[in-house]
Amino acid sequence: MNTSAFSSNPSSNPISGPADYGYTPSIAALFLAHPVPAALSGPDDRPGRIVRLDRNRILVASAAGLLHLPYPGQGPVPATGDWVWLGTNGAGEPAVVDVLPRRSALSRKRAFEASSEEQILGSNIDIVAVVVPMDRPLTHNRLERTLVAAWDSGATPLVVITKADLANLADDVVGQVILQAAGVEVVTTSAEHGDGLDELRQHIPAGSTLVLLGPSGAGKSTLINALAGRNIQQTGSVRTGDGKGRHTTTSRELIPLAGGAVLMDTPGVRGFGLFDAEDGMEEMFGDLETLLSACRFADCSHQAEPDCAVQAALADGSLDPRRWASYLKLQRELAALNRKHDAAARRAYQREWHQKVMSADRGQRAAERYRHDRAEERSGKRRKR
């Protein structure tokens, strides 16, 4: 594994890290700006990066190689891609002692209906590549919601079309994607034939981290093998009936590429619930936000009010009804999530208030019992006299 300290002057930059996993001068500066807290610091402190999270252990890259370590006993739960300080725990064993602030984070709502919690899929990502397979119908809403999450992560979105050699209507699909993903670069690839790989590599400079995000059977593993130049991921077949594939990737993992970039593979994502994605919505639907402000009434419901800019755009064809319906659906989803958050906050407040009231009530009853007992004592003393 390559290591790097980036300086001939040890006093100016004394730490080295895993260059194969994206350790660059800017990351070294990040470590220098966020030293280990004094209470956790030790002589063996060194930079590392989370490569993979397993059930009971985490795989971490350091300048010396890969380490299997226990989960930290305190602090935030790490995510794949996190930069961390490595040191020793109370028992003198190698351990993660601190997690650095994230420069970006790709997240979604946890994948069960009643949840309102955030799931971090990956951190410190530079490019989020939304994989669109050519061998199945384009799912417009899925593409839009994934691009919203990509914009909201703080990384740069990219659309990668795969399996271009399998479709007869490639140009039509590419045209639809370019139109729908306005403002986002689109790269068309065929990993089997090597088409588009050089163009894709141009979007992944040395030291950057790319995450591939797409459904099972989208060709991510085949694409990773092509980019890496070796078979490091298993590939699986796709059912012809419904275009679904089985998961050949079971966990999120960082994979070094020959050019110095890092690729994060992810399991196929069947659903992608948005989580607190206001910034992403603004990036993806900025034109609609502008249109909404052109309505005559500030509280326009965009249905039957006079001088509604949305209805006018729908009528003259400048606004695609499908895009408007998708925007409304995503807004309803985010509003429902906010309500869940608010309800959870209300319940927590009510529990806290109830505890305070009960505590105060117990204190008042105790004080009354104390006064009563003291009065009884004084009364008994007077009777004895």
Image (cartoon, rainbow, N blue to C red):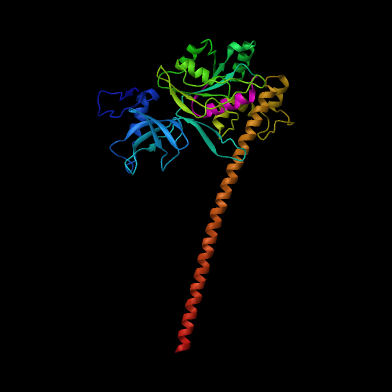
307 shown above or below 382 = above
The span shown in magenta is 137-158
Location of the C terminus by quadrant is bottom left
* Residue 153 painted magenta: yes
Q: Nearer the viewer, residue 279 or 26?
A: 26
As drawn, is 32 to the left or to the right of 73? left
As drawn, is 326 to the left or to the right of 263? right
Residue 151 drawn at (x, y percent):
53, 26
Residue 313 drawn at (x, y percent):
69, 22
Name the quadrant containing residue 15: top left
45 shown above or below 194 = below
Name the quadrant containing residue 244: top right
Toward the right, the furthest residue is 304
At x 55% / y 50%, what residue is drawn?
Answer: 348
Residue 260 drawn at (x, y percent):
40, 19
Location of the N terminus by quadrant is top left
At x 46% / y 86%, what residue is drawn?
Answer: 382
Q: Nearer the viewer, residue 60 or 57?
A: 57
16 shown above or below 200 = below
Residue 120 drawn at (x, y percent):
50, 34
* Residue 4 painted magenta: no
As drawn, is 186 to the left or to the right of 82? right
